Image (cartoon, grey):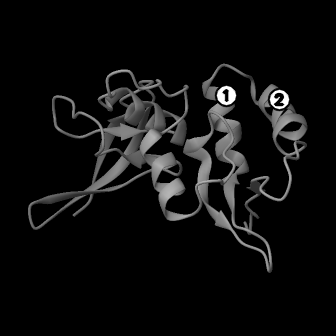
Amino acid sequence: MAEQEMIKCSVCGETAHTNMTNVNGREWYELPEGWKAADTFPPGDDGLQFACHGCCLAQARTASATPDAGAEQPREGEDPALRRDIAEGVDPDIVLFDGLDAAIIGTFTRCGQPPVIAYSYESCVECFMYQGMSREEAEEWMSYNVEGGWVGDRTPAVIHKIDRG
């Protein structure tokens, strides 16, 4: 039997309602769109952590990582573990946008071309809004600086979700 529960983002404090079901002693959450269960950073009082946006999740992961002595500190919005996995598993020369790791949705391949990183347009906009831009500013920044940028064959792809509403 599902019950309504209020969850709170462990980074920015945003709250939302969710349905929680207990199955064989384990709690399962039906999270609102865009929310993530975050088991990769230190738990709170109840042992459960949530992030309301991909940017919050990336920031929480970055904040909880134990830095190596003398290692360069990641920029805001960068997930060192994700970047390492991409370099090792996909291609060490792949191009990544700065500060938008939380918006990565996978890789994009084309016939005869090297793979490129694929970003969610909406998640990129959310990342910029989280950094203090209005939605209008974030969309303008995306259009001119992200989608309008070209760094050669390795330029990342930005994916716009089609609403089939």
List the residue tagged with mark 1. 129
Residue 120 position (above or below residue 102): below
Q: Quadrant of residue 140?
A: top right
Give neighbour class at mark 1: few <14, some 14-19, many 20+ (Cα, 10 Å): some
Q: Could you say where residue 101 lies in the image, as x and y percent from the top left?
A: 57, 43
Q: Tag 2: residue type?
A: Glu
Say left or right for 116 vs 105.
right
- Rounded to the nearest angstrom, the CA distance separating label 2 from label 1 is 9 Å
Residue, x 23% and y 40% (percent of image)?
Answer: 48
Residue, x 85% and y 46% (percent of image)?
Answer: 147
Say left or right for 21 vs 155.
left
Give the farthest residue toward the front: 70
Say left or right for 44 vs 142.
left
Give the number of the disc on residue 136: 2
Please identify the quadrant where the C terminus is shown: bottom right
Please identify the quadrant where the N terminus is shown: bottom left
Residue, x 28% and y 46% (percent of image)?
Answer: 39
- Label 1 element class: helix
Residue 126 position (above or below residue 121): above
Give neighbour class at mark 2: few <14, some 14-19, many 20+ (Cα, 10 Å): few
Q: Earlier in the sequence, mark 2 or mark 1?
A: 1
Q: Could you say where residue 153 lies in the image, as x and y percent from the top left?
A: 83, 59
Residue 149 position (above or below residue 159): above
Q: Could you say where residue 133 lies in the image, as x and y percent from the top left?
A: 72, 22
Give the number of the disc on residue 44: none
In this orientation, which residue lies closer to the viewer: 97 or 20?
97
